[in-house]
């Protein structure tokens, strides 16, 4: 008869293999209690905020859980294992009982993340479409936020699109949609546009713009073609100069990446050069030391991915970099 100690040893030996065990984000403990986490990994299975593309973005969290276990590793550049330093738990998925109603669901998302904020949790989430970011910003930025001390957030927004389309009253019936969130969170006092930057925009807009770097709400815009002309180091310095010492939230729409690296993202901008994954990772690492209080990755459509799930794997790598970025700041004494 095998002893409990022998069984535990066998289980421990299997932890390195992503395909073994019950899938959670990065094989982290499944624990829904926000009081038990420093960094909370959250699924936000939401698709009704972007009715113009395939609805399967709600399948993103489950798919990333499936492949992310292989990235439960040490960070080579930062020189430590986040999992060994902090309480990093899979908090599960936001419950969305009215999932087909976007404007009800964003209320439920905000309520869920306000609970995390009250416990001081720094969330790293996987969506879901980009409508999820607005309610998270409302839960974490501005008056009453425990994590930011009541300060507004500096937004670092990686995307092919600006998502500030308030010239359109709604997006196929959704008022707090994937196309509106970066505007209403400024108007409602959660995000400081003077400390925020949008990175990687490309493709042709819905209407002619006065300039490719002009934001209707005041964000600084660094389009993809500017990054390619000026280089990664200059781009990193522009981001750091912009955000300064403000608490930062990072949102990463997978369509900022070239379709070669993320073919299963929503709203693909084919034909126009996007950031390669290694370039985006270099920019994220260039933010080392800044006070990142939360992040999300959005717009993954697993049913459109190729057989080796390259988009899901890329999303996992970006998520790992975000977890390591937050952990490294906390490890250095940042609050």
Image (cartoon, rainbow, N blue to C red):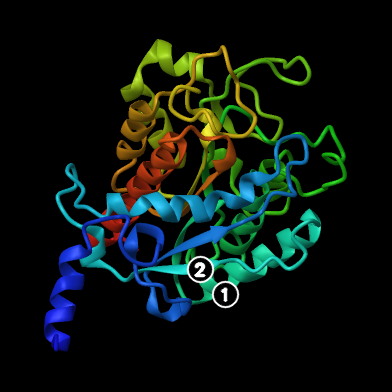
Q: What residue sits right under mark 1 in the picture? A: 115
| Residue at screen point 43% across, 18% down | 227
Residue 294, position as x, y percentages in the image: 46, 56
- Disc on the earlier residue, 2 or 1: 2
**Residue 214 image-quadrant placement:** top right
At label 2, counting other C-alpha atoms closer than 10 Å, the crowd grade (few under 14, some 14-19, many 20 or more) is some
Q: Tell me the number on the disc at residue 92.
A: 2
Residue 40, position as x, y percentages in the image: 43, 66
- Of residues 335 and 174, the one drawn nearer to the viewer in this rendering: 174
Asked whether residue 225 is in view, the answer is: yes
22 lies above or below 295? below
| Residue at screen point 38% across, 67% down | 22
Q: In the rendered view of the protein, which quadrant contains the N terminus? A: bottom left
**SS type, badge 1:** helix
| Residue at screen point 29% across, 50% down | 70
| Residue at screen point 45% across, 22% down | 260
43 lies above or below 283? below
> In the shown orientation, is residue 138 left or right of residue 151?
right
**SS type, badge 2:** strand
């Amino acid at each position: 008869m095998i002893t409990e100690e022998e069984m535990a040893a066998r289980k421990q030996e299997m932890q390195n293999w992503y395909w073994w065990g019950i899938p959670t984000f990065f094989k982290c403990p499944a624990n829904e209690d926000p009081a038990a986490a420093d960094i909370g990994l959250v699924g936000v299975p939401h698709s009704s905020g972007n009715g113009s593309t395939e609805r399967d973005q709600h399948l993103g969290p489950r798919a990333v859980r499936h492949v992310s276990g292989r990235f439960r590793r040490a960070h080579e550049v930062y020189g430590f294992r986040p999992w060994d330093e902090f309480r990093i738990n899979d908090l599960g998925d936001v419950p969305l009982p009215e999932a087909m109603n976007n404007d009800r669901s964003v209320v439920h998302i905000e309520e869920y993340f306000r609970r995390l904020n009250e416990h001081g949790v720094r969330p790293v989430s996987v969506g879901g479409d980009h409508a999820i970011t607005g309610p998270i910003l409302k839960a974490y930025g501005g008056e009453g936020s425990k994590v930011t001390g009541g300060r507004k957030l500096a937004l670092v927004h990686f995307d092919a699109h600006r998502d500030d389309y308030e010239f359109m009253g709604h997006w196929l019936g959704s008022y707090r949609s994937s196309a509106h969130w970066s505007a209403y969170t400024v108007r409602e006092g959660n995000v400081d546009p003077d400390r925020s930057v949008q990175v990687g925009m490309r493709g042709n807009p819905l209407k002619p713009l006065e300039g490719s770097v002009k934001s209707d709400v005041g964000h600084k815009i660094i389009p993809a073609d500017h990054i390619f002309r000026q280089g990664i180091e200059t781009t990193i310095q522009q981001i750091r100069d912009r955000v300064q010492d403000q608490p930062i939230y990072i949102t990463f729409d997978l369509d900022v990446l070239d379709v070669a690296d993320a073919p299963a993202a929503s709203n693909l901008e084919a034909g126009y050069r996007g950031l390669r994954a290694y370039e985006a990772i270099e920019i994220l690492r260039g933010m080392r030391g800044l006070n990142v209080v939360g992040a999300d990755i959005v717009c993954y459509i697993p049913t459109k991915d190729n057989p080796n799930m390259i988009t899901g794997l890329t999303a996992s790598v970006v998520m790992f970099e975000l977890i390591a970025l937050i952990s490294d700041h906390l490890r250095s004494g940042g609050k």
